[in-house]
Amino acid sequence: MDEKELSNLARDTAARLFGPPKKGEGVYAVWRDFDPELAKHISRFFVGRLYSRDVLSQKERELCAVGALTVQKFWDELHVHCHAALNVGASAQEVAEVIFQMATYGGVPCTVEGLKTLKKVLQERGQWQNQP
Amino acid sequence: MDEKELSNLARDTAARLFGPPKKGEGVYAVWRDFDPELAKHISRFFVGRLYSRDVLSQKERELCAVGALTVQKFWDELHVHCHAALNVGASAQEVAEVIFQMATYGGVPCTVEGLKTLKKVLQERGQWQNQP
Amino acid sequence: MDEKELSNLARDTAARLFGPPKKGEGVYAVWRDFDPELAKHISRFFVGRLYSRDVLSQKERELCAVGALTVQKFWDELHVHCHAALNVGASAQEVAEVIFQMATYGGVPCTVEGLKTLKKVLQERGQWQNQP
Amino acid sequence: MDEKELSNLARDTAARLFGPPKKGEGVYAVWRDFDPELAKHISRFFVGRLYSRDVLSQKERELCAVGALTVQKFWDELHVHCHAALNVGASAQEVAEVIFQMATYGGVPCTVEGLKTLKKVLQERGQWQNQP
Amino acid sequence: MDEKELSNLARDTAARLFGPPKKGEGVYAVWRDFDPELAKHISRFFVGRLYSRDVLSQKERELCAVGALTVQKFWDELHVHCHAALNVGASAQEVAEVIFQMATYGGVPCTVEGLKTLKKVLQERGQWQNQP
Amino acid sequence: MDEKELSNLARDTAARLFGPPKKGEGVYAVWRDFDPELAKHISRFFVGRLYSRDVLSQKERELCAVGALTVQKFWDELHVHCHAALNVGASAQEVAEVIFQMATYGGVPCTVEGLKTLKKVLQERGQWQNQP
């Protein structure tokens, strides 16, 4: 894979997970503000080399991301990956179930914060009224 | 669900994930050594009420457990859940892939330790020679 | 203990620690929004089976909660348990002392954030003016 | 309090918690190996200025230490403070109860590892046979 | 070193790192609100005994602080130490580089949050326009 | 930079930090066991793209690594980077000083474990007798 192909793969994978890029927003913009060259390599490695792989389905990968970010208390990044999980076909119930399960490995408070984050995501998508 | 049914559900779910119980070993034995009554309720809640649910497939649930335990650095418990993931149908490649992905959320060293744990599990199961 | 008794025990323990339930607020509401059945079992296990036990005094239990939540950086939950510690008889000095001690196990910044949380709690209770 | 008094206070507090000092062993020896002057100040601050205070009872302080070290996964230090908690009057059941409660804030695996540590401590003290 | 000299050393070291003290603000004010005597000893130990040492240059020490606070997710304290690192001669690029490197040990999300914190610090100092 | 140049840069940077590669050992071997292609990209990104940069001196970079790995409790990886720090010109005192400072951000127990790790490293290098 040459530089151009890798760059395209990273871009397409990011679009499938996170939607169309928004000018000057998101984590890529933060990296680029400080170092455009390094930003490019971070994106190509994590998105192009890692997230694009198909050993796992995109849904499995995103559910695992949701779980890990919940026990790590990375709420902003969890917000991004709750959207991504829903974008690649996980249901709201499935994402919530992963967050509930995380009480086992990260303690009950991370489940509480995680569910609040998911609730916000569902409200942003206009899907909250569908909850039981 | 009455007490008896809940107890059976916890026992059957544990058997599916962790194999037949081994007298005096495992996490249940640790809890019971200190408090048999509380041990029973911990097991019934986490295994009977939570792990037994079918919102996620057992394979999805175990892949999420593997990811969370890797970033939390719970190596003994990761060992248990690598076995469980393989027991419910995940392939060695899929489990490894989750652990690789965790570099993103927990840092590279947790991936290194996680893969060492998985390697030990595969050796115990006589499946290590199958690795690339 | 049957279902009804367990439910009452959880409710009474919660009331002693956290005060009368407020409609649609608090962690229980977050769980119930996503899964009322699981919410019930989480509450019954953690509050009914665990927090209600009398091996420790309620004050000792809450001081330990304050310490653990401080080193875990769970600020919202710490806020809840600072109130609970004061509700079951700990003094503001005692709660502060636990948070000071946590510098030893979790680093100085967790003590700083923990004390800020306690200060907010004391202000909410109209007890801040009593501080030295 | 002059230097001499502070030094005595640190020494007496350490003796009460951890027993008589053992030549060349323990955390103090590790610090002193690298920097005797700094070792002295670390000990005087944490033991002399902080642990010696009486806002909390020594038992309350040690139970909080046990809890925080469990969720922080500091197993060697937990080993030291399980001994200390028992030395200042906590019962084995009380120490175990704190570790059980930590499942709520640090996840179930920290309770498992914590109880294994306590079991070792009780065996070292010849108190294991007394467990239920 | 007597009490007076230690107090002066702590004050001068704090001034070099954090700038002139601001009445009623900062971490010292939080400690003092709860316990003026303990606040004095915390400050004297951490600032007077530890930060003042010259085994490392002040710049090396602050870069290490920036790194550790990033992986520990202590954002408010990172804010303070980004200022301190710049105060003792680190460039914005050097501070950013440490935060980028932390992706390796703490995961990518801590780098994202860390860079956002640094950006705020640079804006407060009127140095943001100089970024590439 | 083409693939070949990047590969060489990663190899030379790794050699400078970690010494000549040892067949079948180290973290690279763990990755390669599971996925040779991904192992290559991980190494090229983290070593070739990130560690090779010269915004920081190699010594500053390694001191920051030592600090972050200490508060993250990654003892095996800390062992590797204590060697690396000494390989690129840090003194034993400087490495110890970083680990001492980490008590501030990660708690005292991480300093204890970190110093034990450094002691082992110094013994492996035949440099322990030089300690005070």
Image (cartoon, coloured by chain):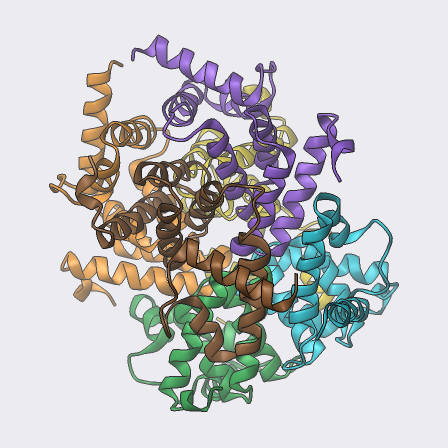
Chain colours: A cyan, B green, C yellow, D orange, E purple, F brown
The x, y position of residue E74, in whole percent, is 56, 41
Please tell me whether residue C41 is drawn above or below residue A76 in the rendered image.
Answer: below
Q: Is residue A33 left or right of residue E26?
A: right
Please indicate, yes or no, whether residue A97 appears anywhere in the rendered image. Answer: no
- Quadrant assignment, res A123: bottom right
Q: Is residue A13 left or right of residue D68?
A: right
Please tell me whether residue D122 is drawn above or below residue D48 in the rendered image.
Answer: below
Of all residues, the one furthest to the top in this rendering is E4
- Quadrant assignment, res B63: bottom right
Task: Residue at 29%, 53% (x, y): give it.
Answer: D76
Is E128 in front, or is E76? E128
Is D67 in front, or is B114? B114
Which quadrant would the N terminus of chain D be assigned to in this image? top left
Please indicate, yes or no, whether residue A32 appears anywhere in the rendered image. Answer: yes
Please tell me whether residue C71 is drawn above or below residue C33 in the rendered image.
Answer: above
Is B48 in front, or is E16? E16
Is F83 in front, or is C40? F83
Q: Is residue E104 left or right of residue B39?
A: right
- Quadrant assignment, res D128: bottom left
The x, y position of residue F12, in whole percent, is 48, 59
The x, y position of residue E17, in whole percent, is 53, 23
Which quadrant would the C terminus of chain D be assigned to in this image? bottom left
Report how many numbered discs are placed on residues in the image.
0
Q: Is residue D124 left or right of residue E92?
A: left
The x, y position of residue E69, in whole percent, is 53, 41
